[in-house]
Amino acid sequence: QPDADMPVPRLALSFFAGIRTAETFRIRWGDIKFASGDIRVESPKGVVGTPPRLVTMSANLKAWLLRYQMDDALPIGYDEERYCKRKAEVVQSIGVEWSTAKNRNVARHTFASFHIAAHRDLAKTACELGHGESLSMLKAHYWGLVDSDEAKTYWAIMPKGE
């Protein structure tokens, strides 16, 4: 489909960096530092004045984003309305049920489960997600949902040809 791949950078940021859907709309290519492997999330949760959060780029996320890298000043894809419409068209065409209102951060929650399984470090996952000291919430919701073999498979998801 034409433009079917345009949601990919935002989806990759959510699935492989745990960045909230709303936060992805504020990210510009200049916030993604390929050399250092850091992604700068300005105004986490949309709260102006909140210090930025630095997120570590995984090898597979870097591969996905390099496929789409554009000029620094540009956003990483469509504007929000166009992105949501295009994502809905794509998921409907392939038969995926993904209610935007109900599951808007499902990719972030997926990231949390697989990050914990891969690293076995609640504090590290909390830092990546921008959570405070609430490790008990992470443990209660995500610990043990995914095993280490599933995590290896997840973190090996690469674009074709990589």
Image (cartoon, helix red, strand yellow):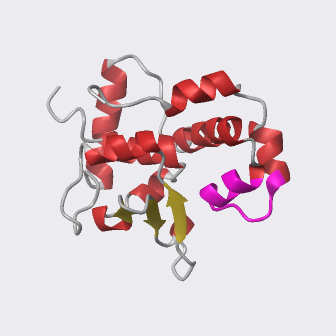
- Is 11 positioned to the left or the right of 162 in the image? right
- The image position of residue 159, as x and y in percent, is 32, 31
Q: Is residue 35 magenta?
A: no
Residue at position x 51%, y 49% in the image: 17
* Furthest residue in direction front, as rendered: 35
Q: Vertical placement of 136 versus 160: above or below?
A: below
- The residue depicted at 31 percent of the width and 64 percent of the height is 28
Tell me the quadrant of the picture where the C terminus can be found.
top left
Q: Nearer the viewer, residue 40 or 99?
A: 40
Q: Is residue 111 above or below residue 95?
A: below
Q: How many marks?
A: 0
Highlighted magenta segment, given as a residue range: 123-135
Residue at 75% across, 47% down: 121
Q: Nearer the viewer, residue 15 or 94?
A: 15
Q: Quadrant of residue 88?
A: top left
Q: Quadrant of the N terminus?
A: top left
In the picture shown, does residue 9 fall above or below 5?
Answer: below
